[in-house]
Image (cartoon, rainbow, N blue to C red):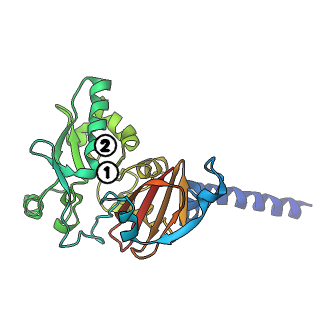
Amino acid sequence: MKKILTVISIFIIFIFAFLIFEKVFPSEVYVIKSIFSSNHKNNFPVSESYYEEKYTNLNELIKNGAEINNSLMLINSEHPLPKDYSPDLVDLGDIYINSCAEQAYKNLSQEIKNSFNNSLYIMSAFRTLDEQIEILESGNEYAASADSSEHLSGLALDVYVKHYAGMGFLDSEEGQFVNSICHDYGFIIRYPYYGEHITKIPYEPWHIRYVGLPHSKIIAENNLTLEEYIESFIPNKIYYYENYFISRGKADSLLIPKGFSDITISPDNTGYYIITGKH
């Protein structure tokens, strides 16, 4: 009897430990399942016909009104920007940012103004390659290598409020607020405190990166880095989140469901494109 109880006890302990391990160290499959409903047809109150899937290509989507931007480009030491990359920039008054991030930043900035009666400023956004090299040569410990800096894309913004910049940004209520809600506006903390072993970059609470909705929400809700997020997509599968669909594929073979609009296309800088649509 004691042997049976011992075996049962060991089995229970094993199951408990397994569940804890899966919670703390989720596998890639677990991450995918917990974030999305892949090819799940019950997420939206629409008829089955909306979920007929079809293959198309990049040119056909653009021809039919899809927007293309660079919001989901993965930029790091393993995936530097192409040498011929040229971002689409807008001028915010001596500060240039990627055009796809313009409205999102204005919305976030207005939220800071409304909530704190204070202004959110950009210390640094787009940089030329020469400017990035100059920063590296000055010994800046946080600067990424010249061709792998997100600042070359104009998608990364180093933000601050008066008297609070850099790591001191978190000493302000505004900085804490930005870190906790920027994902509602399409931004993520690109180098989070929990992701240094993946990004290889120390925590930068002032460095926000535009990825767009719903991607920013998914990343923030699941404590992911952009690296983990991009890699979690299995090519040629459709994922659903709230009233969005997301898929990833090659330019000549993109899978989308019928019945969705507001389609946005972004290269992910790993050889694939990520398609996002809203119902």
Q: Residue at x 35, y 72 (%)?
A: 270
**Tag 2, which secondary structure?**
helix
Question: In the rendered view, would you say 158 is above or below 119?
Answer: below
Classify mark 1: helix, strand or loop. strand
Front tag of 1 and 2: 2
- Could one spot residue 154 in this view of the protein? yes
> Three-letter amino acid code at disc 1?
Tyr
Q: Quadrant of residue 136?
A: bottom left
Say whether residue 217 is left or right of residue 44.
left
Mark 1 vs mark 2, CA separation in Å: 8 Å
User: Is residue 142 positioned above or below 175 on the image?
Assistant: below
Q: Quadrant of residue 81?
A: bottom left
Q: Nearer the viewer, residue 36 or 149?
A: 36
- Indicate left or right for 134 with 125 as reference: left
Residue at 20 percent of width and 57 percent of height: 88
* Residue on which the image places disc 1: 210
Who is closer to the viewer here, 47 or 193?
A: 47
Q: Amino acid at mark 2?
A: Ala
Q: Nearer the viewer, residue 53 or 270?
A: 53
Q: Which mark is residue 104?
A: 2
Query: Compared to 241, does 165 lie above or below?
Result: above
Q: Indicate which disc, 1 or 2, sits on the residue closer to the N terminus.
A: 2
Task: Give x and y (percent) for residue 6.
Answer: 82, 61
Residue 26 visible, this orientation: no
Dots 1, 2 in contact, CB < 8 A = yes
Percent x, y for residue 30? 58, 61
Q: Is residue 221 left or right of residue 30?
A: left
